[in-house]
Image (cartoon, grey):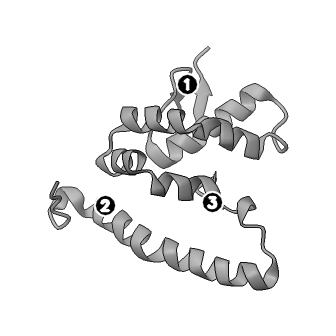
Amino acid sequence: MYVDYYSPNNKSKLAVSLYLATAIPTMLGILLLLGGQLSINLSRLVIGGVPLPIVIDFLKDDTARNAYFQGNKKLLHNRLDQMGVEEQIKDFYRSQINSEPELDRHIHQIFYDNTGYVGEAYRVNAEGILKFKY
């Protein structure tokens, strides 16, 4: 499928594509080079609140990546669910957030901030913060 990144409707996609094509690989390359010399634990690094290994798995998955760049929130949510991303992120944050409902809200806030997806049990307030519906 051809996407005209220069049309006014796709300027943000062009910016994201350029960012992903340059900044992230550069950062990862630097981290990997430094990681071997400084023993950095790359599994504890996060991008947008998402652990780096999960971001890498996401970028490798054609369906998830395409759904994200096409703005298909429902397909993206379903694919991330199939990949077990929510549980992986919960496992990452569980030692920092003791309350299971608050942990769930935090994970959904990360999803909302990065994809715009709002889980069924949540609503978004005027400040862009997810709140429980019930």
Percent position of residue 57, x then y: 54, 54
Q: Quadrant of residue 108?
A: top right
Q: Are marks 3 and 1 in contact (CB under 8 Å)?
A: no
Quadrant location of the C terminus in the rendered image:
top right
Secondary structure found at label 3: helix
Quadrant location of the N terminus in the rendered image:
bottom left
Q: CA distance from mark 2 to mark 1?
A: 27 Å
Query: What amino acid is labelled 3 in the image?
Result: Leu
- Residue for point 80% across, 82% down: 38
Percent position of residue 54, x then y: 60, 52
Q: CA distance from mark 3 to mark 2?
A: 23 Å
Q: Which residue is mark 3?
A: 52
Residues 19 and 39: in front is 39
The disc, 3 or 1, on the residue closer to the chain's N-terminal end is 3
Q: Which residue is mark 1?
A: 122
Where 119 sits versus 57, above or below? above
Secondary structure found at label 1: strand
Percent position of residue 18, x then y: 36, 72
Label 3 vs label 1, nearer the camera: 3
- Residue for point 63% across, 57% down: 53
Where 123 sits versus 6, above or below? above
Q: Is residue 120 visible?
A: yes
Query: What amino acid is labelled 1 in the image?
Result: Tyr
Where 4 sits versus 99, above or below? below
Task: Report crowding for label 1: few under 14, some 14 to 19, many 20 or more residues within 10 A (C-alpha).
Answer: some
Q: Are marks 3 and 2 in contact (CB under 8 Å)?
A: no
Task: Report crowding for label 2: few under 14, some 14 to 19, many 20 or more residues within 10 A (C-alpha).
Answer: few
Secondary structure found at label 2: helix
Query: What amino acid is labelled 2 in the image?
Result: Ser
Label 3 vs label 2, nearer the camera: 3
Q: Which residue is mark 2?
A: 12
Q: Left or right of 122: which side holds 75?
A: left
